[in-house]
């Protein structure tokens, strides 16, 4: 879509031109998931985004002072080099040099302010799977982490092979089964509730948003509404199957995983939610199909390997049905992830974010070539 470096773009409906930018879109009707899912890439212009957190000397001073204090508590100090800063609508990060190696500061927008608290809790519950924060400020949504080393994607041949996806899915399933009893704690931390019974309210909220309705266009809004009865039935059926909810990372891929001493370490929890655990399959299977070129049989084997731990309690046929439903409904989680914005960036980014949200709602409704069953 058009880039707007000065001011915001006017909202417009998601179009086939946009779909054409997504590999797997528009070429063939009724493609099986995940080949028809929007490809993992950024339609949004993020060049030149700026935040008062970095531009305002007083606010920047608060960040530096907080980082210095957290490092000092560890007997460390910040290096003289200026930080390397990255700004996105949904987060901002800065890499600082320090006497204990690189450290990473992250600030979250209000809608993702749960992330620092979640990172701290996960370090207590599963320290083998996450980085232990150097500092956490829950009220401001600030997080300071040690460097995790190279990401998984930089250590494996490109594209990442199926054994790597299988390893990652095994880690995720083990974590989710372990944390299924932590749902009240997770919700208490402010982690979004995307369990099947909560999804109808989220869909209603999106359809009530003027920017999203403008991006959908009248035909798109009607298409989503026509699918509402089926959507509600899918949510009810997924809940009825009876798989315990757990933590969904929301965006698990080789760029959000470190490999340290032979074990996987997950980071970047800003898209996390309490959800049906099988929603976690959404991103890995999509990447495996669209980036790694996995065939349908390969995807089924990855799915079945992930589901294996649950076969002790549930028939595989039910698990497969639940996985299909959870993956389909996970489109709402992706829409929610794209809706988060720093207040200072709303005018600049909101129209393009609304297009991203609309893209996922149209996918949910089967308007992008995917089968909505």
Image (tube, helix red, strand yellow):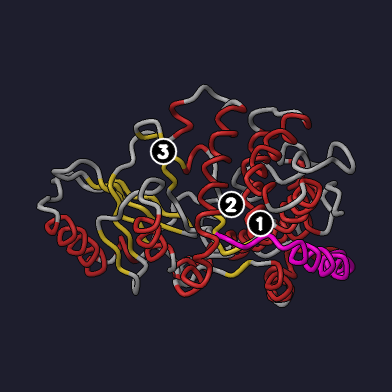
Decide if residue 156 is on the left or right side of residue 161: left
Q: Which mark is residue 44?
A: 2
Residue 299 versus residue 329 in the image, above or below: above
Is residue 117 one of those drawn in magenta?
Answer: no
Range of residues picked out in magenta: 221-246
Is residue 227 one of those drawn in magenta?
Answer: yes
**Mark 1–mark 2 CB contact (< 8 Å):** yes
- Categorize mark 2 by other alpha carbons within 10 Å: few (<14), some (14-19), many (20+): some
**Whole-number angstrom distance, CA of label 3 to CA of label 2:** 26 Å
**Whole-number angstrom distance, CA of label 1 to CA of label 2:** 8 Å
Decide if residue 257 is on the left or right side of residue 128: right
Nearer to us of marks 1 and 2 is 1
User: In what quadrant of the picture does the C terminus appear?
Assistant: bottom right
Q: Which mark is residue 258?
A: 3
Decide if residue 2 is on the left or right side of residue 63: right
User: Residue, x 64% and y 42% (percent of image)?
Assistant: 306
């Amino acid at each position: 879509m058009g880039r707007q470096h000065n001011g915001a773009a006017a909202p417009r409906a998601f179009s086939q031109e946009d779909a054409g930018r997504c590999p797997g879109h528009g070429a063939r009707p009724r493609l099986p998931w995940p080949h028809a899912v929007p490809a993992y890439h950024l339609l949004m212009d993020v060049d030149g985004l700026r935040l008062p957190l970095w531009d305002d000397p007083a606010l920047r001073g608060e960040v530096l002072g907080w980082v210095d204090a957290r490092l000092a508590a560890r007997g460390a100090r910040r290096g003289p080099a200026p930080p390397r800063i990255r700004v996105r609508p949904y987060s901002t990060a800065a890499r600082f040099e320090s006497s204990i190696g690189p450290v990473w500061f992250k600030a979250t927008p209000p809608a993702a302010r749960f992330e620092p608290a979640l990172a701290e809790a996960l370090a207590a519950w599963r320290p083998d799977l996450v980085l232990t924060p150097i500092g956490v400020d829950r009220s401001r949504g600030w997080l300071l982490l040690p460097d995790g080393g190279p990401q998984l994607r930089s250590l494996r041949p490109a594209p990442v092979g199926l054994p790597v996806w299988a390893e990652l899915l095994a880690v995720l399933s083990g974590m989710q089964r372990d944390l299924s009893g932590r749902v009240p704690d997770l919700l208490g931390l402010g982690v979004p509730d995307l369990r099947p019974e909560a999804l109808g309210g989220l869909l209603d909220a999106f359809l009530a948003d003027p920017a999203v309705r403008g991006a959908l266009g009248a035909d798109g809004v009607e298409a989503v509404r026509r699918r509402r009865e089926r959507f509600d039935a899918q949510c009810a059926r997924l809940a009825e199957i009876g798989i315990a909810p757990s933590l969904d990372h929301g965006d698990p891929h080789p760029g959000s995983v470190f490999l340290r001493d032979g074990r996987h370490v997950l980071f970047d929890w800003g898209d996390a939610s309490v959800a049906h655990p099988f929603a976690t399959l959404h991103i890995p299977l999509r990447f495996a199909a669209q980036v790694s070129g996995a065939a349908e049989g390969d995807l089924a084997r990855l799915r079945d390997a992930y589901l294996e731990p649950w076969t002790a309690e549930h028939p595989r046929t039910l698990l497969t049905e639940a996985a299909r439903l959870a993956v389909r409904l996970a489109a709402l989680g992706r829409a929610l992830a794209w809706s988060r914005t720093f207040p200072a960036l709303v005018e600049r980014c909101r129209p393009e974010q609304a297009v991203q949200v609309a893209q996922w709602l149209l996918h949910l409704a089967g308007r992008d070539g995917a089968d909505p069953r």
